[in-house]
Amino acid sequence: MAEENNQELDILVAEDSFKKLLNRLPGIFYLYEHINDDFYLKVWNKHHEEVTEYTAKEHYNMKPYDFIPSVDKDLIYETCRKLMKIEKVQVKSAIRSKSGIDTPYFFEGYAFSSNGREFFMGVGIDLSNYSVMERELEESKQILEKLEKERIIRNLNTQNKELLIFSVEIAENNKLKKAIRKQIEEIEKLNTKEEIQQALFKLKSSIDADTMDDAKWNAFKYRFKNIYHNFFDSLSHKHPTLTDSDLLFCAYIKLNMPTEQISSLLNISKMGIKKRRYRLRKKLLLNEKDSLNHYISSF
């Protein structure tokens, strides 16, 4: 999986449109991956090479404080660690080029995760010409927002598509169950043996036509874990009293499914969903002011 993710990143960086977009930035652009409490440079623009004087080959996997004067190295390291917790930071420091030239810069970074990996990306604006800093920063932020929107759309299209397909299949299965239950009720009203046999034959045909077994449920859980790797483990570890049924209900909430869709998937009424949410809140020890959806989305 890590190899596939690296290939996806390489393919994205290799795209001419992506390179042109990065090189249009008025300042430097960087994207670091957070690995084992450290940070490794994966993507940068041409201006980054020009300012730091390092070659493209030297750039790969360098750390943010490799470009910083000694006096600010601890500041930058702690700022990077803080960024992974609060998702956005701003900081001022100098960039020291390979030849030892220091240039004052203003940095702004944004943290995000993708396919179980943690990253932060950001821009740096040269403070030597402070009068144009605000304009350049706004332009950079607009481009970053465009990149972030494209990344979110790409993730939604590739990661959640299969989950939604499985959800629809499960909903269709529940409709089949309701139809079978209705047929059984009709059979109970029949009088002759011949009528009952004919009705049972039709019922068996319906079941054979579209049988939903545990395999699809397991497939759904497997797909879910591939996208939200630690969701079930983290939730179960913190709340060991949760049953498999509770965890599945939490998974639907994690996907931001509306009540109507969850009701169809679980084959229970809207009132039943309300009761399930109430019991789940008690198991999770949430008070009245706590949002169940927000709490579950934090895992």
Image (tube, rainbow, N blue to C red):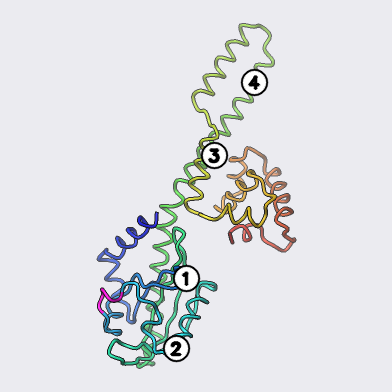
Which residue sits at x=35%, y=55%?
4
Is tag 1's residue or tag 3's residue first in the polypeptide sequence?
1
Q: Which residue is mark 3?
A: 217
Q: Which residue is mark 1?
A: 111
Contact (Cβ within 8 Å) of mark 1 with mark 3: no
Q: Which residue is mark 4?
A: 184
Using the image, tell me which numbered label, if any, was put on residue 72: 2
Image coordinates of residue 269 in percent, x first then y, are 67, 40
Contact (Cβ within 8 Å) of mark 2 with mark 4: no
Is tag 4's residue or tag 3's residue first in the polypeptide sequence?
4
Gap between marks 3 and 2, in whole Å?
A: 53 Å
| Region of the chain picked out in magenta, as a range | 55-59
Q: Can you tell which of label 1 and label 2 is closer to the viewer? A: 2
Gap between marks 2 and 4, in whole Å?
A: 75 Å
* SS at circle 2: helix
Gap between marks 4 and 1, in whole Å?
A: 55 Å
Q: Is 127 on the left-hand or right-hand side of 86?
A: left
Gap between marks 1 and 3, in whole Å?
A: 33 Å
* SS at circle 3: helix
Amino acid on which disc 1 is placed: Ala
Is tag 1's residue or tag 2's residue first in the polypeptide sequence?
2
